[in-house]
Image: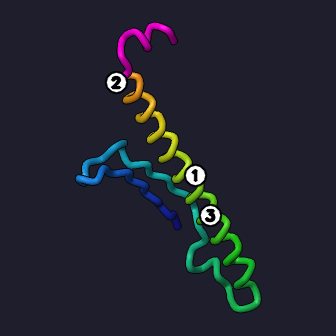
Amino acid sequence: MKMRITVEIENEDGTKTVKPVVVDTDIPGYDDFKGPDTFLQDFDVLEKAVLEIRNKAAKEAVEAYLSEVSKKKLQTKPTSEKDTQ
């Protein structure tokens, strides 16, 4: 099985700030949960995969957002400030 997480960053008016970030990963399927004796181990595999993909999606979304912020800041600086950098 696969899990897919999509992160979107929107302006207050609902327009997208950056394109959505989509990350997916493999997770244990239904058959991987074999029974009560191994449930905690199987759940641990699932939980680690979910936490890893969540962190990766959030990191990529923030990086994309900050990249856009820096582009916008450079575009709005007066010409004299751009020349000194």
> Which numbered disc flags the more N-terminal residue, 1 or 3?
3
Secondary structure type for disc 1: helix
In the picture of the structure, the residue carrying the numbered disc 3 is 51
Secondary structure type for disc 2: helix
Q: CA distance from mark 3 to mark 2?
A: 37 Å
Q: Position of residue 62 (x, y in %)?
A: 50, 46
Q: Is residue 68 above or below residue 16?
A: above
In the picture of the structure, the residue carrying the numbered disc 1 is 56
**Left/right of residue 12 with respect to residue 55 in the rendered view:** left
Q: Amino acid at mark 1?
A: Lys
Colour treatment of the image? rainbow
Looking at the image, which residue is at 56% across and 79% down? Answer: 30
Q: Is residue 34 above or below residue 10?
A: below
Q: Is residue 45 magenta?
A: no
Looking at the image, which residue is at 43% across and 55% down? Answer: 7
Neighbor class of circle 3 (other Cα within 10 Å; few <14, some 14-19, many 20+) is few
What residue span does the magenta drawing correspond to? Answer: 76-85
**Left/right of residue 29 with respect to residue 35 in the rendered view:** left
Q: Position of residue 38 (x, y in %)?
A: 74, 84
Q: Main secondary structure of the magenta part?
A: helix
Disc ID at residue 76: 2
